[in-house]
Amino acid sequence: MLTIPTRYTARFCDGSARREFLKVGSLGLFGLSLQNVLKLQDRAKAAPVPSRLQGATGFGSAKSVIVLFLQGGPSHIDIWDPKPEAPANVRGDFKPIKTKVPGIQLSETMPMLADSIDKCTLIRSMSYTPAGLFNHTAAIYQMLTGYEPTEISPSGQLEPPSPNDYPTAGSWITKFRPPSDPVLPFVELPRPLQESSVIGKGGAAGFIGKAYDPYRLYQDPNKAITLDDLELRKETPASRLEKRFELLKGINGSMPELEKTVSKNALDEYYQDAFDLVLSGKARNAFDLSQETAAMRERYGRFTFGQGALMARRLVEAGTRMVQLNWPSVANGNPETTAFDTHAANFGPLRDLHCPKLDRTLSALLTDMDERGTLDETLVVAVGEFGRSPRLGVSTSGNSNSPDGRDHWPYCYTAMIAGAGIPGGRLYGESDATASSPKEKPVHPNDLLATIYYALGIDPNQEIHNHLSQPRDLVKGKPLMDLWLG
């Protein structure tokens, strides 16, 4: 906890000390503990838009972004990119089905999305070659930060988060595109990114500071959730809090110059943000799924991922810039439960467990947002850290695989993108006959990340500085501007 020092102790009329009021991080009088969201955060201002981007197609077309991060690496060939003409040990057990758009097929595991395919574009040419051995942690870090882990550590593999890490995308979005309303700028739910005991790698603000970390709601949205840090304490009604805030401003006005500089220039803005956030109720209400009809909740699916997507829709409607909805399982978890890591078993878990949830949730989110008119101003992206090996039963990453299992495969996989004015019902890029490598328009993860920044009105080519004050690119990728061309 950070306490701003004072040379004297003033007391409010209700007996609470000014020193207590200035305990940054606990905000005891507010009943708020958003240390990593609002802590002495500068009033971030978006960088000026370069002339080359002013009026560019698609630039700034999104107010918010929802990233459905399918940690674990879902099999592209068994979900998004079926290859019915490939050999049996490649095409697998599933048959392709027609979709609403002629010429686009999906796996039979995605019948609901087949009816909503006109609202999204499938990028079937995602591809990168990892540096050295590749695992979930390294791939997640690259996908969400735009940098390989080797940029900050010699091994670049299974290492815990570090203050020297490159910031995750949502943290840059928070810095460059702060919301104007009293809402949470960046929310991550319902669990952290995780492989084995490494938790949160690629999911924090790194060297730009914890003030830009996500608000982490690590609770199951399909169950009752608690939001103590977004609520007033029962013994502190709003009217009383307002009086305290006015008294604080009055005290600040008569403080010695040094302390006034510390407090008034920094803390007034901090408390005003926290004050507005709590009293407005916008953030708290956005998490309240009881305000949705039973039919709507069923539409998304009464399970963790489905209700998380519904919550994400509510958050961006309230003004949150980025919601990252992580697939609710550790990256290398058991595929017989909820994990996409299908080394030991691929077809049964996809057919019976994972795809029914993924299919229902994606189709509901796209259709619901389209009906509400919010898809045009929201970018929706669904992607994992890599795909799965086209050939069954082979080892591509040093892992062992069952005869019907698929290993890690970053060389070709699929991402889904929708909204923000991007025409739906299309394919971007193409994989080869066995979904092993791109046939045309290869898309590096950094290009996808650059596209997210671009859609939100952030110049992806701008220069930033790392923890050593060394100049770096925000992301070494190019936005896919032709996504917006019909």
Image (cartoon, rainbow, N blue to C red):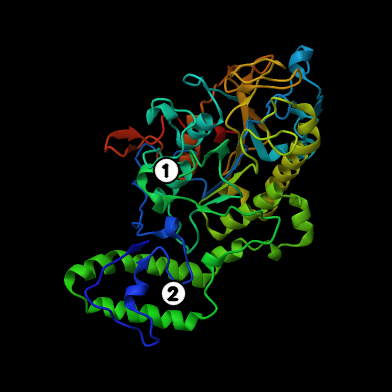
Which residue is the extreme one toward the front? 197
Q: Secondary structure at mark 2?
A: loop
Q: Which residue is mark 1?
A: 458
Looking at the picture, how far across and down is residue 388, in whole percent?
65, 24
Horizontal side of 444 relative to 357 (left or right) equals left
Contact, CB < 8 Å: mark 2 with mark 1?
no
For discs 2 and 1, the disc positioned in front in the rendered view:
2
At 38% across and 36% down in the image, what residue appears?
474
Looking at the picture, how far across and down is residue 117, in whole percent?
72, 37
At 55% across and 69% down in the image, what residue appears?
281
Q: Nearer the viewer, residue 428 or 81?
A: 81
Q: Quadrant of the N terminus?
A: bottom left
Q: Amino acid at mark 2?
A: Leu
Per the rendering, the mark at residue 29 is 2
Q: Amino acid at mark 1?
A: Ile
**Residue 59 appearing in the image:** no
Mark-to-mark CA distance, 2 and 1: 36 Å
Horizontal side of 63 relative to 190 (left or right) equals left
Q: Quadrant of residue 42?
A: bottom left
Q: Residues within 10 Å of mark 1 (few under 14, many from 20)?
A: many
Looking at the picture, how far across and down is residue 47, in whole percent?
34, 47
